[in-house]
Image (cartoon, rainbow, N blue to C red):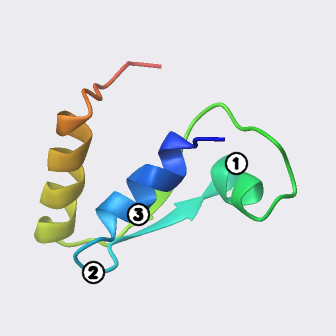
Amino acid sequence: MRNIYFELTEEFNAKGPIVALASGQAVVYYRLSLISKDGDWVLRETPEACQRALEILARHGARYRPG
């Protein structure tokens, strides 16, 4: 079964580690749960890491939704 959050994590880290999967999707990754409704990452706090993550998210059509 496809998991976009796992795929995004791999894409974020393709050129070196900048994120760690966190929260609900991390629980899914370790098979403690079957599903989670969204993705959370811990992001390396550098301008380069932030820029790479934003570029990848933009390519996938992600957008901010006020909550």
Do residues under tags 1 and 2 come within 8 Å of each other at their CB atoms? Answer: no
Please provide percent x and percent y for residue 45.
Answer: 27, 71
Q: Secondary structure at mark 1?
A: helix
The residue under the point 26% across, 34% down is: 60
* Callout 2 crowding tier (Cα within 10 Å): few <14, some 14–19, many ≥20: few
Q: Is residue 2 left or right of residue 66?
A: right
Nearer to us in this view, 51 or 58: 58
Circle number at residue 10: 3
Which callout, 1 or 2, points at the residue further toward the start of the chain? 2
Q: Quadrant of residue 39?
A: top right
To which residue does mark 1 refer?
A: 24
The residue under the point 29% across, 29% down is: 62
Which callout, 3 or 2, points at the residue further toward the start of the chain? 3
In this view, which residue lies farthest toward the bottom? 16
- For badge 1, the amino acid type reads Gly
Q: Quadrant of residue 17?
A: bottom left
Q: Is residue 18 left or right of residue 30?
A: left
Residue 15 vs 54, above or below: the answer is below
* Callout 3 crowding tier (Cα within 10 Å): few <14, some 14–19, many ≥20: some
The residue under the point 76% across, 38% down is: 35
To which residue does mark 2 refer?
A: 16
Residue 15 vs 34, above or below: the answer is below
Q: Quadrant of residue 44?
A: bottom left
* Callout 1 crowding tier (Cα within 10 Å): few <14, some 14–19, many ≥20: some
Give the CA separation, mark 3 to mark 2: 10 Å
Whether residue 56 is visible, yes or no, is yes
